[in-house]
């Protein structure tokens, strides 16, 4: 068997693994990263990027189709059509450009990319099945970055009409009707996109409301928009299997319903992926289904780190990347530990939701007395000029010191505000800092300024 050796071996080239390998390479650490798929992981191949491409295409189509129905702003358009096969091909083009770009970045940094599935022998050795035959790789340090995969429901195994998010992002024909099982962010992002493209969408969520991880104030505008788009949302509802006639059986609080749908998209969560890599055989300490790590992403085995989705929530690309960069610097001998104050999260529904830091309820649960300031986009000139006045920015701060603990927003295009929210939290901003920062006019970002002012009882525009 061919043998290779390195200082740092990274299993998985998702956002966690590839960033780790690039940074390690930049720092002169002899690094090998292994993945059977094009580098970029779930995020570039079947996650963040493909879903945002579909969402954007759906937004564009919906905007034009809506102009045909109700001309606004003096613009009229007719005859909009969508060819989902062409949309999917456009999305695939973006994906290959990005995965090719990552391969180039790895090369430039001097990290070696080995294409193949790795199986760990121990904490320092892996056998990789490559197209050219097996390769044994020896390393001084190991990083497990094998990510996550969609959870399958035993009553609705993937296949045929029952699809995962991976399949939904590869469709070449628009389903006339779509049942989405699971009203978390992935189900709602995709469900909204398909509704805008013209599918009849029903969302089935077991919890009392959709997006249960966000507070009700934030999710209300999303609920209202789903209703306006004609999406039917069933909460407190549990999907069973398929009936003899091929309908989806749904148990409701007050009975049952059979839902007829051309495709059933199951988005009930993601679970860590590691079976193929032989991770269980290392007998590492676990935290539920996830690998247990400390503030340096060290597992219970010396010299073995773990990063990204395989280490638990929040399962987000930018968390994986930050962990990857940190572990690379540790491998290069730098004193680093996880000391971030906030990991922002964006839900690309319509309207979008941004969450950074603590919500008022979370702060109160920690025994902190807070003040909040909320500025609605209905009072924003920029929101009016863009035809979308739904939503708001909300600031939560300590009552005693004014230290900002959390910034949340819901509204069209607010994802781009996430950077400013995270920066304010990471820099330990107080309400006075938010109030003392000149925000460009007219922008949606001014809502942060006004929310900060309002929390201090000094609002100017409301
Ligand atoms: P992954 O990206 O899952 O990568 C793991 C890699 O390991 C894979 O490439 C896999 O092939 C490889 N691998 C597994 N086993 C082996 C093995 N034995 N040998 C070699 N390689 C192996 N996050 C966001 O932050 N923003 C978003 O907007 C967003 N949207 C999403 C939309 C969808 C539809 C989905 C599914 C996910 C989305 N996510 C989003 C989540 C994001 O994709 C993940 O959090 C992120 O990809 C995790 O990175 P990772 O490096 O931990 O793992």
Image: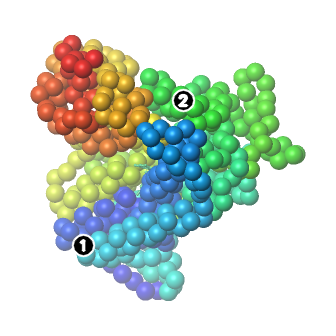
Q: Relative to 391, does residue 326 appear above or below in the rendering? A: below
User: Which class describes the residues within 10 Å of circle 2: few (<14), some (14-19), or many (20+)?
Assistant: many
Camera sees residue 272: no
Q: Relative to 356, does residue 305 appear above or below in the rendering? A: below
Q: Are marks 2 and 1 in contact (CB under 8 Å)?
A: no
Task: Write down the residue under mark 2.
Answer: 223
User: Tag count in the figure?
Assistant: 2
Q: Position of residue 203 (x, y in %)?
A: 64, 37
Residue at the limit of the structure toward the left, as seen here: 436
Q: What's the distance in space between the residues labelled 2 and 1, CA to CA?
A: 45 Å
**Ligand 1 within 8 A of label 1's CB?**
no
Q: Relative to 222, does residue 106 appear above or below in the rendering? A: below
How is the rendered protein coloured? Answer: rainbow
Task: Write down the residue under mark 1.
Answer: 109
Q: Residue at x 50, y 86 (%)?
A: 132
**Ligand 1 within 8 A of label 2's CB?**
no
Which of the marked residues, 2 or 1, is nearer the chain's N terminus?
Answer: 1
Q: Residue at x 55, y 38 (%)?
A: 70
Q: Quadrant of ligand 1?
A: bottom left
Q: Nearer the viewer, residue 75 or 292?
A: 75
Q: Position of residue 444 (x, y in %)?
A: 29, 35
Quadrant of the image occupied by residue 200:
top right
Q: Would residue 371 be found to the left or right of residue 238 on screen?
A: left
Camera sees residue 2: yes
SS category of the residue bearing label 1:
helix
Residue at the limit of the structure toward the front, as seen here: 74
Q: Position of residue 41 (x, y in %)?
A: 44, 62
């Amino acid at each position: 068997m061919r043998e290779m050796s390195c200082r740092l071996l990274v299993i998985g080239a998702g956002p966690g693994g590839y960033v780790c390998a690039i940074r390690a390479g930049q720092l002169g650490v002899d690094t090998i990263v292994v993945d059977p798929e094009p580098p970029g992981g779930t995020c570039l191949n079947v996650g963040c990027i493909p879903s945002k491409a579909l969402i954007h295409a759906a937004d564009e189509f919906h905007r034009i189709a809506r102009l045909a129905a109700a001309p606004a702003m003096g613009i009229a358009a007719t005859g909009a059509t969508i060819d989902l096969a062409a949309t999917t091909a456009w999305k695939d083009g973006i994906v290959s450009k990005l995965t090719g770009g990552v391969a180039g970045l790895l090369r430039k940094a001097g990290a070696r990319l080995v294409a193949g599935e790795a199986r760990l022998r121990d904490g320092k050795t892996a056998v990789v099945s490559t197209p050219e035959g097996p390769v044994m790789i020896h390393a001084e340090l190991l990083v497990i970055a094998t990510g996550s995969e969609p959870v399958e429901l035993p009553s609705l195994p993937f296949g045929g009409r029952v699809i995962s998010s991976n399949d939904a992002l590869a469709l070449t024909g628009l389903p006339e009707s779509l049942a989405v099982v699971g009203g978390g962010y992935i189900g709602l992002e995709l469900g909204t996109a398909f509704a805008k493209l013209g599918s009849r969408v029903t969302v089935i969520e077991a919890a009392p409301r959709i997006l249960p991880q966000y507070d009700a104030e934030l999710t209300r505008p999303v609920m209202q928009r789903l209703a306006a788009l004609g999406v039917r949302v069933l909460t407190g509802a549990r999907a069973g299997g398929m009936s003899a006639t091929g309908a989806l059986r749904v148990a409701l609080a007050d009975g049952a319903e059979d839902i007829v749908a051309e495709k059933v998209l199951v988005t009930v969560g993601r679970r860590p992926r590691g079976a193929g890599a032989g991770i269980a055989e290392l007998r590492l300490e676990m935290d539920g289904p996830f690998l247990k790590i400390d503030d340096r992403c060290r597992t219970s085995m010396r010299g073995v780190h773990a990063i990204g989705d395989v280490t638990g929530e929040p399962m987000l690309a930018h968390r994986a990347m930050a962990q990857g960069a940190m572990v690379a610097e540790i491998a290069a001998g730098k004193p680093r530990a996880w000391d971030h104050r906030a990991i922002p999260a964006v839900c690309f529904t319509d309207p979008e939701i941004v969450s950074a830091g603590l919500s008022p309820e979370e702060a109160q649960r920690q025994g902190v007395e807070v003040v909040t300031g909320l500025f609605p986009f209905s009072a924003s000139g920029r929101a009016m000029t863009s035809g979308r006045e739904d939503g708001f920015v909300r600031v939560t701060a300590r009552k005693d010191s004014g230290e900002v603990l959390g910034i949340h927003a819901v509204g069209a295009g607010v994802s781009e505000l996430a950077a400013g929210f995270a920066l304010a939290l990471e820099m330990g901003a107080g309400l006075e800092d938010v109030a003392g920062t000149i925000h460009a006019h007219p922008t949606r970002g001014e809502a942060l300024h006004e929310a900060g002012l309002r929390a201090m009882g000094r609002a100017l525009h409301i």
